Amino acid sequence: MTEPTAKHLDDYRVSDFLISDIELRFELAPAATRVTAISQIQRQQTGATELVLDGEQLELERVAVDGRDVAYRLEPGKLIIADVPERFSLELVTLIDPAANSSLEGLYMSDGAYCTQCEAEGFRRITYFLDRPDVLARYKVRIEAPKAEFPFLLSNGNKVDAGELEGGRHFVSWEDPFPKPSYLFALVAGDFDLLQDSFITRSGRNVALQVFVDKGNLHKAHHAMASLKKSMAWDESRFGLEYDLDIYMIVAVDFFNMGAMENKGLNIFNTKYVLADTASATDEDYHGIESVVGHEYFHNWTGNRVTCRDWFQLSLKEGLTVFRDQEFSSDLGSRAVNRIHAIKVIKNQQFAEDAGPMAHPIRPQSVIEMNNFYTVTVYNKGAEVIRMLHTLLGEAGFQAGMKLYFERHDGQAVTCDDFVAAMEDASGIDLRQFRRWYSQAGTPVVTVSDSFDNGCYRLKLSQQQPRIKGLSDPLPLHIPFDVELLGEGGQSLINRVLDLTGEEQVFEFPNLAQRPVPSLLQNFSAPVKLKYDFSTEQLVTLMRHAGSEVARWEASVELFSRAIWGNVSKLAAGDAMGVDSRVADALRAVLLDPQLDRELVAEVLALPSINSLIEQVETVELDALLAARRFVVEELASELADELQARYREQSVLDDAPARALKNACLALLCQASAEAESLALAQYHGSNNMTDTLGALKAVMAAELECAEPLMADFERKWNATPLVMDKWFTLHAMAEDDAVLTRIDALSQHPAFSLSNPNRVRSLIGSFAAGNPAQFHRPDGRGYELLTGYLIKLNSANPQLAARIVTPLIQFAKFDAVRQEKMKACLGQLLAMPDLSRDLFEKVSKALATD
Ligand code: B3K
Ligand code: ZN
């Protein structure tokens, strides 16, 4: 194998040629779809004579320039035509095999329907093209297929023609008036149930809304449709952005590598983010659908109307669109709870990425396989960077920046710098230093110390930046640091955002009667690690009195984390474990506070996860950590059993999502405290009329390994074996069980009739969730957890490289573990690296991991 090479941001050159228009004709057939592409091409760089097009897995039938066959050259991944004129029409005919396409990139088949996925570089599997986001063309698409099997033939834009053909075939033609990059092209052909509705935009245009789902699922499409209408209204009211075509289509397919795709006017979705009814979907699923439908819709402006110049700029559209979908969820629901979810993604997953071999800035500087960079760093840290801009500029300044951004760049392919420049110019705020967030990788640490004398409280803040291999030396960042100071009785004295720009700065707060309690980095105002030596008293005060609910949750996480780490130290010293009574008291106060958002109380009751605890330290003694966390959970649960029972019963008679969240959090703890809670769980499972409660009961008994777990799991399987998305929950519950039999169970389940290695949702639910969500068994000291994952990666490597490279993540993040585990993880990675047909996707991650030594 020739080793894959990296592309670099600094090597960007404008394209030698541009394509203004393309006409595509698809004659669909499973094993041999003929694609005719006629492109209008003109030279952009004087002197360029050779046209180099991207293409993969294509069988080329014809190459004609201005109607005449011409000579050409094929190189791996390229079609090269020498001596082309200044302006010409290029006709290409290629044959492709969608039925054999298991990578789910380009044109492929999902349960008998044709569909496409072109981002990032999938269009080159459909025809030879300038497959880069800065080549924007107008698309006309004609699709032909047998009518009975494929009554719906869909593509981007507006339907302009349709008709019957010989032999039971028919055709439909589409025209998209908006020039777009090839990654936004989409085609779907199949037979679906169709939910229709419409939306009147604020300027009075009527937009047809269509959601296509597998036959028999129409009743599960209503929430997605409602979410779409809410998204359209919200983007108008909060951002002043209106939809621009006459039709908006969403198609749900079973086989999909990620959540969804924002193709212009024709979104393609994973069924997981469309289908829902209360019997089969949890409140969390409902929320996920709303936020992904919103996310893809918001891309219409941030991504489609203004797109990326090159793939290194991915965060331009993704960070911004995640920020927008987070704001959408927060405006519609609980702002505090949404913020907590976003913070957890950063602290549990993004910090781990930063600490591992794939650490990269939100604008990466070098990439081997672009699909590997759809990461929590680009997306979620990217959104935090946008959020910091919002904090620095305020809502009005931020919106002025957005307005200027669209005025300047509508219809263009631009860079992250262009975005920041618009924010800077519209607000007059100097963002020169702030721009470093785009080029520096790794998690900054902000260390805080304080002093109090003569009524003056001083906060000393210093920032430390990690050095990352391959990147230049880091410089101090502009960090908005949100602080609240509380008085003795918990009253708020000062609320302010400090600008930390230097390596070290002291901020003074004079004229205070007594030493305040500081609430630091409120609302997680920057994606950094905070180091401050909180006392238990301070944390207890913050948990009870901090002005923001997010700060109260943060204080609880800090308090519980300290209780757990304290016991890790006790174990190491051979001392008996214990929990300070103030910790239980503080938790009791939150549990019984009737004013608090119940979903937030549920978040507090969840206690910090193992993965989040691992991110708090440099190296981890996993066995001690698992034991200490288990001990603290059981202690707190039995200490608070009466109060948990009382709140459980009180919430049980209510019927809303916050009640279910709190009730299930109480139940999970109660089951940890004593087997007596089994009867509660059983009653809940059998009396439940919704998936949230059913799954809540099942999760609680599985986690506590109660006797009823097995029969309930069997019952669940009987009821739901025909509903794949629900079976995914069942696979995940099995994969997350911490008992020693989990490995053999996973192998047995991989043969289950509802399981299939070719469906990414199934693979993620069984294999992905084991590796990422079951640290106790994945990191078993004998290394068999790593071997299990490796076995599946070997099977997935060539079939679906994108998916394989996604679920390998926990295996490359070995740096914090002990030498024995590290050796075993590296041995597995070595086995992967030695594969003769290793994909670029896995090669990039595995080779980077093994190069860290
Ligand atoms: N833009 C797509 C993700 C494409 C992933 C390609 N590997 C979905 C989204 O972020 O909205
Ligand atoms: Zn996106």
Image (cartoon, rainbow, N blue to C red):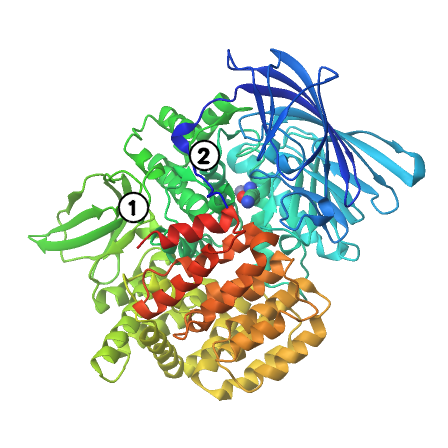
Quarter of the displayed picture in which ligand 1 can be seen: top right
Q: Residue 233: image x %, image y %?
A: 60, 39
Tell me the crowding category of disc 1: few under 14, some 14 to 19, or many 20 or more residues within 10 angstroms, Cα based: some
Is 398 situated above or below 523? Answer: above
Occupied quadrant, residue 606: bottom left
Q: Say which amino acid is labelled 2.
A: Gln
Mark sitting on residue 468: 1
Quadrant occupied by the C terminus: bottom left
**Can residue 108 be seen in this snapshot?**
yes
Label 1 or label 2, whichever comes before in sequence order: 2
Q: Residue 597: image x %, image y %?
A: 45, 62
Q: Mark 2 — residue?
A: 313
- Element marked by disc 2: helix
- For this rendering, which residue is in front, 650 or 444? 444
Q: How far apart are the two marked residues, 1 and 2, measured between alpha carbons?
A: 20 Å
Asked if marks 1 and 2 touch (Cβ < 8 Å), the reply is no
Q: Residue at x 46, y 72 (%)?
A: 784
- Element marked by disc 1: loop
